[in-house]
Image (cartoon, grey):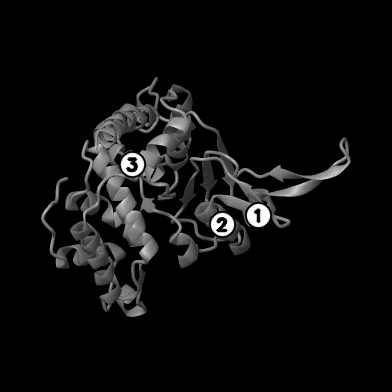
Amino acid sequence: MTDLTTTVAEFRVLHDRVVDAVEQAVHGKRPVVELVVAALFSGGHVLLEDVPGTGKTTLARALAAALGGSSRRIQFTPDLLPADVTGTTVLDPARGYVRFRPGPVFTHVLLADEINRAAAKTQSALLEVMAERTVTVDGTTHQVPHPFLVVATQNPVDLDGTYRLPEAQLDRFLVRVALGHPDAEHEVAVLRPGSTAGDIAAVPAVTDPEEVASVMLGLQAVHVADPLLRYVRAIGEATRLDHRVRLGASTRALRGLVSAGQVQAAAQGRHYVVPSDVQRIVHAVLEHRLVLTREAMLDGVRAVDVVAAAVEAVEVPRPVAV
């Protein structure tokens, strides 16, 4: 318990350092930054969905800078090929043999910009990497660096020439978040000449990949009591039984909810998860995974309504401290 208490205390300090560093370039969006950081330490991936000019790319690049690791960016276009993402084998004329040339996925933070503009086969090239952290080319498996975070962006407007992400790929993203426009006070601060908003050079490196990987491993020991696990499972079951839903929360989604809950608890300085940790992130984790019936969509029902109804319908267990 002493080791876990130390890990949680160290993570709480590290968490705040990373969030504060990212906020040097992304102003007025601390809750969103905290969600993205939670996804990183949960071992998940992030889908940023918002209109142009709200800072999606800036957020991803700022996070990479704060982590001190490598980062790469892929601009997804209709003519992008799977090999452009994962890498390919090439002939090395100087040495006279074929070697593997790694693609941009071999990095710590990968920014997949406007992922919905690439064809389905190219989108699918990310699936193995996101789930398995490996790339297989010509029968040989290559491991990507650890930690590995995909931050994908997509634009909900100007949909001409875009390819909708299939449910199987959406389920690979731990959270989906929208930045939105800043409030009046922060937007004025962003507009002020000399502001560091959008300035990636102003983001200090406050950690390194080795420390992040070590902390991620330690956070797996954060206690999740059986009543809490049953609570998470009941929320997922409520989405599946809702008559407005054609496809409810998957088991992968619920596992992600538990992992993200552990990170939320540790960020609050606790070594055990309570219901409020789950409630704080349940919408970001589950909404994008639900497929509503056609009738529900015609009636104006949204995924946020279904998740809210599921949380409301499930009895909250009493917190169990250890």
Q: Amino acid at mark 2?
A: Glu
Residue found 39% across the figure and 20% down from its top: 194
- Disc 2 or 3, which lies upstream in sequence? 2
Residue 229 higher or lower than 93, as above or below: below
Q: CA distance from mark 2 to mark 3?
A: 24 Å
Side of 134 where 215 appears, left or right: left
Q: In the image shown, does 148 or 65 lie closer to the viewer?
A: 148
Which residue is identified by label 1? 136
The N terminus lies in quadrant: top left
Mark 2, Cα crowd under 10 Å, few <14 / some 14-19 / many 20+, is some
Q: Residue at x 37, y 33 (%)?
A: 26
**First in sequence: mark 1 or mark 2?**
2
Q: Across the whole image, how many numbered discs are drawn on residues?
A: 3
Q: Nearer the viewer, mark 2 or mark 3?
A: 3
Tell me the tag on residue 128. 2
From this viewpoint, is residue 319 visible? yes
* Residue at image mark 3: 219
C-alpha gap between disc 3 and disc 1: 29 Å
Q: Is 305 situated left or right of 253 in this image?
A: left
